[in-house]
Amino acid sequence: MFNLYQIIQGAQGGQAIDNLAQQFGLSSEQADAAVKSLIPALSTGFMTKAAQPGGYGEIVGAMGDDQHRQAYADPNTAQDPTTQQKGGDIVSSIFGNSAIINQVAEQASRYTGIPAATLVQMLPVIASMVIGGVATTMQNQGMGGLLGQLAGRAASATFWGN
């Protein structure tokens, strides 16, 4: 099992939290609190999605997308509108609709004091970095070939624009 918070901490050469802070006009402490408050919902969303018919294939297909791996590694890619769109597709897919996304953001807002609208904007970037980080971790653990095979098979069933 992957610790998604640790993946974000290691993203972008260990600077992802600071980069998120800068991107969204937050302090590093606020960005860290935002990540900590959003990761449980993302984790639950990924697990729920993976349990649905075709859901696991969608997740694996997204892990095969270079955009997410680059967002994990590079803050400029994480801020790119394409990354935000693809991350938004992931968020929409795992949560199902904007009402649930807004509920997740409202709950995180109560915990962090960060406006829910800011958290809604952060979710796609964080989701993209998480997917890219899981893929990178798998690659680094010698599972790149398996990931490539799975992603190739999943690509035809993917709804996330890969």
Image (spheres, rainbow, N blue to C red):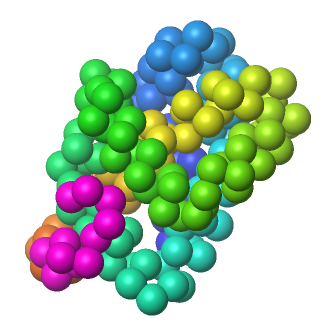
Residue at (48%, 79%) from the top-left corner? 50
Determine if the magenta segment contains residue 140. Answer: no
Determine if the magenta segment contains residue 155. Answer: yes
Relative to 158, does residue 26 appear above or below in the rendering? above
Does the image show residue 74?
no
130 and 106: which one is in front? Answer: 106
**Furthest residue to the right?**
110
Residue at (50%, 12%) from the top-left corner? 22
Image quarter for residue 11?
A: top left
Q: Position of residue 4 (x, y in %)?
A: 53, 54
Residue at (33%, 79%) from the top-left corner? 57
Q: Position of residue 114 (x, y in %)?
A: 76, 24
Relative to 24, does residue 82 appear above or below in the rendering? below
Does the image show residue 15?
yes
Residue at (21%, 58%) from the top-left corner? 162
Image quarter for residue 129?
A: top left
76 and 95: which one is in front? Answer: 95
Q: Position of residue 75 (x, y in %)?
A: 33, 25
In screen coordinates, is 89 left or right of 135?
right
Relative to 5, does residue 144 appear above or below in the rendering? below
Residue numbers of the magenta segment: 152-162
In screen coordinates, is 12 left or right of 121?
left
In screen coordinates, is 85 left or right of 91?
left
How many numbered circles are shown? 0
Q: Position of residue 127 (x, y in %)?
A: 47, 48
